[in-house]
């Protein structure tokens, strides 16, 4: 078996270079944790038949996180004029992805596709010896741009999202994911987008701020008329509750508060405390206590708004370095090969500068690779 070429059963792994073109993104649904996109996926084995074992018939790439998918073309493992073997796959569909909503509506989301060999393995399981071996790699000297974005195809509302980054990473599956203990080579390609919060600022936060301030007008009603006071406050509490329902409908069911939820819940707490304060004057028959409680609630609301503005500005300014998502891949050194080309890199990134963000640097791109020479 020692004479078997790469890609043959029992032979060394066939290195297949994968590149991805994001052709369009038409919908992002954070509630369902899905997005619609069209991609071109290209697999290339340099050297082709001169290097690969004759029995090797291509990697048969498969998108693992597709909720529904339509393969536009019929992929074939073809020999090109330069001697390379190439397989091209064009897909359109709905893909699942995990969206982090902690800082909604200042959230940064990663739209990812997970590509895996369907035919061959990276490392066969302990009882599997008849599998061909394929190692998917990100890039080498002959493929300087392994992941690109056709910006004209990104039709998600630019007033809601800005495209910031495309990323591609190499890795492998966990042996526990396979019933036979196989380890499969994987590629993750991602499109990172940032939400523009203006819609939620003007349609949720600003109205909530106004309604909460209006509850303090109940303090102008004499303390000996608690029914009139409560009538004003309760009406505004119900209005605030309606805005909480609107905010909840914009995010998936999560067990913690988003940045927007924090503001709406704080507003409901303050208005509820104002409702309690509305009865203090009647219960104590002391206008000074009634007035003091009102001033304390006003001060609490003012302090919270100051804190919230500082928090908002901090997250808005530093969210790129704080919260850019990173796809987690297995990188166990047991599956590294000593003869793997040092030209390959585990991660490649392309930053997208849009004219409305930086006019002087529009269409400026740069790439960054972490830890050159360390890859699967």
Image (cartoon, rainbow, N blue to C red):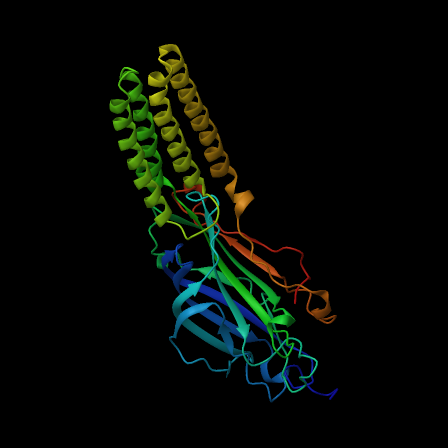
- Left or right relative to 11: residue 71: left
- Give 203 or 10, whichever is nearer the viewer: 203
Across and down, in percent, residue 156 comes to 35, 54
For image coordinates 41% across by 81% down, the residue present is 74
Across and down, in percent, residue 6 comes to 66, 81
307 in relation to 49, above or below: above
For image coordinates 46% across by 24% down, the residue present is 303
- Give 355 or 203, whichever is nearer the viewer: 203
Using the rendered image of the protein, determine whether residue 140 is visible from the camera's viewpoint.
no
208 in relation to 68, above or below: above
Quarter of the figure that contains the N terminus:
bottom right
For image coordinates 72% across by 65% down, the residue present is 333
For image coordinates 33% across by 25% down, the residue present is 213
Q: In which image quadrant can residue 32 be found?
A: bottom left
Q: Across the whole image, how many numbered discs are drawn on residues?
A: 0
Quarter of the figure that contains the C terminus:
bottom right
Using the rendered image of the protein, determine whether residue 55 is visible from the camera's viewpoint.
yes
- Give 122 or 253, whichever is nearer the viewer: 253
71 in relation to 266, above or below: below
Q: In which image quadrant can residue 131 be found?
A: bottom right
16 in relation to 21, above or below: below
Q: In which image quadrant can residue 34 be found?
A: bottom left
- Left or right relative to 67: residue 15: right
- Left or right relative to 61: residue 13: right
- Left or right relative to 348: residue 103: left
- Give 175 or 335, whichever is nearer the viewer: 175
Across and down, in percent, residue 168 comes to 54, 61
């Amino acid at each position: 078996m020692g004479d078997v070429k790469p890609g043959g059963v029992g032979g060394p792994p066939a290195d297949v270079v994968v590149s991805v073109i994001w052709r369009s993104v038409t919908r992002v649904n954070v509630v369902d944790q899905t997005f619609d996109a069209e991609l071109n996926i290209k697999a290339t084995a340099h050297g082709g038949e001169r290097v690969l074992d004759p029995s090797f018939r291509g990697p048969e790439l498969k998108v693992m996180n597709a909720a529904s998918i339509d393969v536009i073309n019929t992929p074939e493992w073809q020999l090109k004029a330069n001697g390379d073997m190439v397989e091209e796959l064009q897909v359109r569909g709905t893909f699942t992805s995990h969206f982090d909503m902690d800082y909604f509506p200042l959230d940064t989301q990663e739209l990812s596709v997970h590509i895996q060999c369907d035919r061959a393995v990276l490392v066969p399981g302990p009882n599997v010896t008849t599998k061909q071996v394929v190692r998917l790699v990100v890039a080498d000297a002959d493929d300087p741009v392994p992941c690109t974005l056709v910006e004209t195809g990104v039709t998600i509302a630019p007033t809601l999202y800005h495209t910031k980054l495309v990323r591609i990473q190499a890795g492998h599956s966990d042996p526990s994911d396979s019933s036979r203990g196989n380890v499969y080579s994987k590629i993750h390609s991602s499109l990172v987008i940032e939400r523009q919060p203006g819609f939620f600022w003007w349609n949720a936060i600003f109205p909530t701020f106004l309604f909460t301030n209006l509850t303090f007008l109940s303090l102008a009603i004499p303390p000996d008329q608690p029914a009139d006071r409560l009538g004003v406050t309760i009406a505004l509490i119900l209005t605030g509750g309606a805005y909480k329902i609107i905010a909840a409908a914009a995010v998936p069911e999560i067990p913690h508060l988003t940045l927007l939820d924090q503001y709406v819940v704080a507003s409901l707490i303050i208005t509820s405390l104002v409702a309690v304060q509305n009865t203090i004057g009647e219960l104590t028959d002391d206008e000074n206590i009634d007035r003091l409680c009102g001033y304390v609630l006003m001060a609490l609301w003012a302090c919270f708004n100051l804190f919230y503005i500082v928090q908002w500005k901090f997250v808005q300014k530093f969210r790129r370095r704080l919260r850019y998502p990173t796809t987690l891949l297995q990188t166990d050194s047991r599956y590294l090969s000593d003869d793997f080309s040092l030209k390959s890199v585990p991660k490649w990134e392309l930053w997208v500068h849009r004219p409305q963000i930086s006019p002087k640097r529009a269409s400026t791109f740069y790439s960054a690779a972490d830890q050159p020479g360390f890859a699967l």
